[in-house]
Structures are given as structure tokens and as C-alpha cells.
Image (spheres, helix red, strand yellow):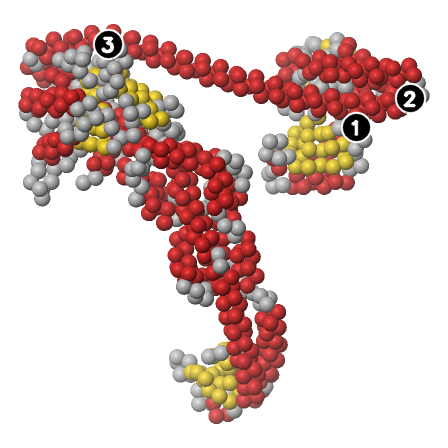
Amino acid sequence: MNPFQHLDWADLINHLERLATCEVSREAIRDMGVLPNEEMALKSFQEIEESQKILAVGRRPTMESLDLYSTWYERLKREAVLKPLELKDVRHFCIEVLDLKDSLSAMTSRWPRQMFEDLMEARGPLSAIDQVMTASGDIRNDASETLFLLFKEKQDKERHLHGSLDRIVKKNEMTSILQDRYVTNRQGRWVVPVKSGMQHDLEGIIHDQSHSKQTVFIEPQEVVAFNNQLAHIEGEIEEEIERLLTELSRYLQKHVLEFENSKKVLQHMDVRMAQGQLAQQVHARPCRFNSERIYLLNVRHPLLILQNDRVIPNHVELSTNPQSEKQPAKHILLLSGPNAGGKTVLLKSVGLAAHMARCGLLICADEGSELPFFEGISVAAGDDQSVYKNLSTFAAHLKALTQASERKGPQHLLLVDEICSSTDPEEGAALARSFIEHFDKNKVFGIVTSHFGTLKEGWSKESGVIYGRLEYDELAGRPTYRLYLGLPGQSLALKTAQSIGVPKEILDRALNFLHPETQARHRKLDELESLKGETLELRERLRVEEKQAKDMKQKYLELVTHFKKEKETWLARAIEKGEKRIDELIEKAKQSAENLKATLDFKAQLPLIIKTAEKTSIQSAEDFARAYPPGSVVYVTQLQQEGIVQSAPDSKGRVTILSQSMRLQLGWQELSPPTSALKRSIGQSVSKFDGGRSGAATSGLGARYERSMDLRGQRVEEALREIESQLDIAIRNGEDRLKIVHGHGTEALKKAVRTYLSRSPYVRKWKAGDGQAGGDGVTWVELAD
């Protein structure tokens, strides 16, 4: 019996198999075992993480063609001529190779690049196949010039032959002879249906008879020559097709080694991507290998995650290396707690993590977790009784414990569920303690669960045994599944009985039957649990808060770094653009020495001006609403005067403004701060050389302002009117581009917008947004000068 069946390993492998796309990969997953060393496991971790990056880029490449690979590949190796159906399978293989290469092309790290290089260049074989046959597997009529001419000749002959047959069946004198007025094909010859017994009235060759014997199919004598010619042409067509298939097969045979190498890559990638998908689904992470320590952060059971169950993560820490004289090595965890409290789940979670790691799979624990690369994992759990071997449940359990007792050293992990429980409690507890002491002596890592009360005390500080309890919320009357180290847990049999409705008189009598020492131990454990619980809860809370603080600090540092890089890029662009514009103004100002000097001074101060303006930039309608609530004074660019804000921006970013008895609705982008003397002075200075046009260009709410409009949900006519209006405003303001958000929908709006832009004299060019700029649901417009 496989010991890992008790760890739910088979169920995990079954799920992993379903994530593969071909049976060849599923078989490889079923045969997956322990890797030779930890270096191979670490390499596997890295490849699985890389496969997750590939999956994140686009859709998951499939390798379904591998299930039919061996059929055509073996025939190709034997230099056989492939049939059209086999060539169809080769074509499918080439397409999947190209699909995988496309997915790998964007990757820059070593392993995916190596996989990319190992894949064949399949465009040549694919093109050769497509030249001969269609995607459905039919031979193309134009596969060669000879074949094209033969098919054309065949069509001409068939047309003449059908014309002759149509004339025959339409003759009035044939009405009494023919069974029906149609022609058909029998044994490759075109024939007419004649009533049985009337065949002597039509000169020709009998080819077949209907099942009912009522119809005889006769080839009329006058079309025999046409049929003979057709048969000859069809023979030539078959010969030409055979020649083409032979030539194509010979060409493909030159790529036999490349096919085999690509097949290995496809299978390897299919397995890795299945493992990557599993890791994504169960939030698995790589671990580090440490021969002296088990350190699992938030370890979880993967199958519970897949079942969408509420999973409580736990920290498990064991070590064979003493931390200090006061803190000796603790390498055996003795778990206790109530029934259905999560002991077995935790044991399986640790066991699965250990086995997954040595098989090269990412584990269900947070990054930073550590495990030994275990040489052996011994499991004594479940019912292993065997009728054929005359073993009871208890005898089978003892046999498993005996085998586990032979393991020595931290490279072995022992997992024992309910140690020695299926026998007399007193004898079972004594035997259990003896086994645990032996495991401790052998310095193995171990997790043991038990309800025996005598095992919950009496362990010296120098022993390698540490208590662990699964918490039980007595107020709620249910387990919390949280692990607390250093304190044994109570089995709570009486409390469980009380919660399910056992009569009080039975419970009271049971309490009286308890041994005085047991009653005293219960009281002592209650007190310890209360104090220990408060301490551990506080420590856990501090640990969570510390992690959150570290995460927030890291996120903040990343945002600061990103902002600085982005700021430098935008400033450089703004300066370059401004200097270019000023150079144009200088050319216009050459006739005026005074204006030329003012422009040159302005150009010299441009970087400082842009940096100053950038500090006060407003980037969104939300920013505007916070900066300018109703009642605030703003500068209205269109009117060249100030106004009072009457409302917050609506869903389209429009703001109601009152200016000299006029009430207007304007986009927030068309408004600027009233006290921005710097910006207005810039506009006035530049307007001397630009006829006033540049003032509008600098009057926005930020140096990096770009006009944006959202048309989603609008009708085509309404959207085009708004585009026309915004283009007018943008041209008047001297803006250089416009962002239009139209979404996808039925694509009617997108097509109408882009058609309008293609014809507009205001538009120099437009382009669809890329993945970083909104995708195809956004169109960027570059305005004409």
C-alpha cells in the first residue's frame, strides 16, 4: 500500500493530471516521483515560476497533438509515405510548436529562452503541408501545376459527360424505361437507373443492381468513351497526388530529429504549465532547503483550497539544532486537541508540503518557508488492516511504527496519526511514549497526534518533543484550527458530548468517574490555556502587524521609485517639446531683437518652469473635486476670465461654472488656478511670438495634461458630435493629442469613431492603445498643427 495515499497525494496528482492538455503529459505526471537531489528540486521550482509568467502573458498553449505524435513519427522514421490524415496530425503539431514559440518569445530569462531555442522552426514544414493540402486534410486542387490541369480537365470531361446523360434521361422515349430521371455513380462510372426487365431496351453496360432488385444501373454506350477518359484522368490524378505525398514525406523526413526534440519540449512545457496552474490555484510558493529546520509559514492543505473550503493557515517550526542552552532543539511535534479540531489536516498539510518539495512542486506555504530535502517520509495513519496478511488495524499500525523506528537523522520525516490508539488506553499510552522517545533519540523530524492524556505531560525540557494544540473556541463551541506551540491541548470529549446534546446526568456521572489526577490535570490545563492563549494571540497580532508594516513600506518604496522614474521621463519629454516650440518661435522673432531676447530668456528658464508647474498638476476629476469644491474661483480658458465653481465634476468630468452671469458646463481640464501667475505669465510671454495661440496650450491644470473623453454608453451620433466639439476646443488650445475611450461592445462605436477620425482635417493620425495604454478599447489621436 502506498503510504502517501493517507496524505491525499493521489487526489492532488489526479487534479494535476486534469490540468495537462495531452495524455502523454498526464502519464508523466502519474509517474512523477522524488527528484534525485535538492538542486533538481530548486531547478524545478524556478521552471514552474517561469511557466506562471508565461501563463500570465496570454492564453495557455496546448499540446494535444502529442497524443497522435507517435503514429506518424514512427512511420516517418521508417521513411514511409504519410497519408493525408497523418499529415493533418503533423500540421497540428507544427501549429502547436509555433504557438508555444510565440508564447516564449517575450520571455528573457534563461530557461524559457532555452526552450525557445530547442523548438524547431516549424514554419517551413507547415508551409510545405499547406501547399499540398487544406486544413481539413483534403488535397488541394492547385497543389501542383500538373494537378491543377488534371482537375480542370476532369471537370470539363464530367461536364460533357453529364450533359450527355442529361439528354438521355430527358428523352421522351426513355420515360418508360428509366426508374427515375437522375444520374449516379457506380464503381467510378456514371450510370442511369433503369427498371428491372427493361435493361434490354437501353444499349450499354450493366454495373450494379439495387437491393430491392427493382433497379438496374446501366452505363449507356454513348458515354462509355467519356467514362473511360475520366477513369484515365482520375488515375493520373492519383499518381500525381501520390507523387506529391512522397515528395512531402521525403522533405519532412529531413526534420525527424527536430520533430523529436520539439516533442520533448512540448511535453516538458505541458507538465510545467500544469504545475504552474496548480501553483496559481492553491497559491503555492517555492521553499528553501535547510537540513536542520522545518519552518513553514502559513502552511495550508492544497485540496481544501481547491474545494474552496475555509482554510486556516498555521506556522510550524521544528529544528534539530538547539537555538540556545535555554532553548533546546525541538524536532518532534506532539499534537493534541479536540476531535475534528484539525490535527490530521495539519499533519497532512506538513506531509504534503515535504513530499511536494522533494518532487519539485511549489508548496502551499508562504515564501521564506524552509524544509529539509527528505530522503524518506514514513506515514502511520489511517486503517491499514489486511485480511490477507492477518493484520488487525492495531497490528498494521505497530508494523508501520516499527519501520519508522528504524529511520535515523533529520533527513527523515515521521507522520503518525493517533499513535497506538486502537487498544487498551493505558498500554497504548505506554507504548506510544516509548516509540516517541525512540524517535527523539534517532533525531528524526516527526509530527504525532494523540488523545492520550499521559502523553500531554512528563516530557523534560531537554527532550526534542514540543507540545502543540489546535485551539478550540469554548464560547462558540467549535474549533478554530489554529496551532499554538508549547502547550498541550485537551481532547474535550465531555465538552463535545455536551455540545451535541448528551444528557446532563450522564455527563455529571462521567465527571465523577474521572481519576483525581485527570481532574487536576484538566484544571491545570484550563489555567495554562487561558494564560498561554492570551500571550500567543498577542504575539500573533504583533507578527501580522509587523508583516503588514513591512509590506506597506516595500510598496511605498516601489511607488516612490516608479514615480521618480516616470517624473524624469515626462520632464525630459516636456523640456524637449518646449525647446522645439521655442526654436520655432525664435525663427519668427528674428526681426525683433527685444522679443528674441525675451524668448531666449524664457527657453533658459523652461526646465525650472516645467518643474514648478509639475508640482501643482491635477491629474483627474477626483483631484479637481478635492482641490476646487463648489464656491472656488478658477480661471476659464475659453473666456480668458475667472469664474466660480458651481458643482463637482459629473460622470463625464464636466463642471458647472458661473462667470459674469453666464452659466457654462466645461470639462475640468479647461479650467486652471486663478492665482497661477507663473503659468499666465508664461502664456503671455510666449503669445508675443505666437499670436496668442500658445497661451491656451499652457493654461491647463498640469504640465502633463492630455485631453481625454469617455464615449462608452453613448449612441454613435451623440459620440461623433462630442468628438467634433472636443477637437475644436483642443485645436483652439494648441493641444497636440487627444485620448478617446470607447470600449469594445459590438465594435460599432469603435468603427464609427475611427472612420470619423480618418476623415477629419483636425487629425494628423490616430492609433489604437497598446496593452499599457488602454488596449483596443482606446484610440489615441494626434492633432494636426
Q: Nearer the viewer, mark 1 or mark 2?
A: 2
Image quarter of residue 763: top right
Q: Which residue is mark 3?
A: 325
Tell me which residue sits at (49%, 78%) in the image. Answer: 188
| Residue at 23%, 17% in the rendered image | 330
Q: Secondary structure at mark 3?
A: loop
Callout 1: helix, strand or loop?
Answer: helix
Residue located beneath label 1 in the image? 731
Q: Position of residue 282 (x, y in %)?
A: 37, 31
Q: Return the disc, 3 or 2, that comes first in the chain's sequence.
A: 3
Please give the name of the residue rendered at 41% of the width and 35% of the height, measured from the top-left corner. Answer: 48
CA separation in Å, label 1 and label 2 = 26 Å
| Disc nearer the start of the sequence (1/2) | 2
Image point (62%, 37%), residue name: 776
Mark 3 or mark 2, whichever is nearer to me: 3
Tally the marks: 3
| Badge nearest the viewer, 3 or 1 | 3
Where 388 falls versus 785 (above or below)? Answer: below
> Which mark is drawn over residue 590?
2
- Callout 3 amino acid: Glu
Of the two numbered discs 3 and 1 on the same chain, state the one appearing first in sequence.
Answer: 3
419 and 116: which is toward the camera: 116
| Label 1–label 2 contact, CB within 8 A | no
Mark 2 is on which residue type?
Lys
Q: Residues within 10 Å of mark 3 (few under 14, many from 20)?
A: few
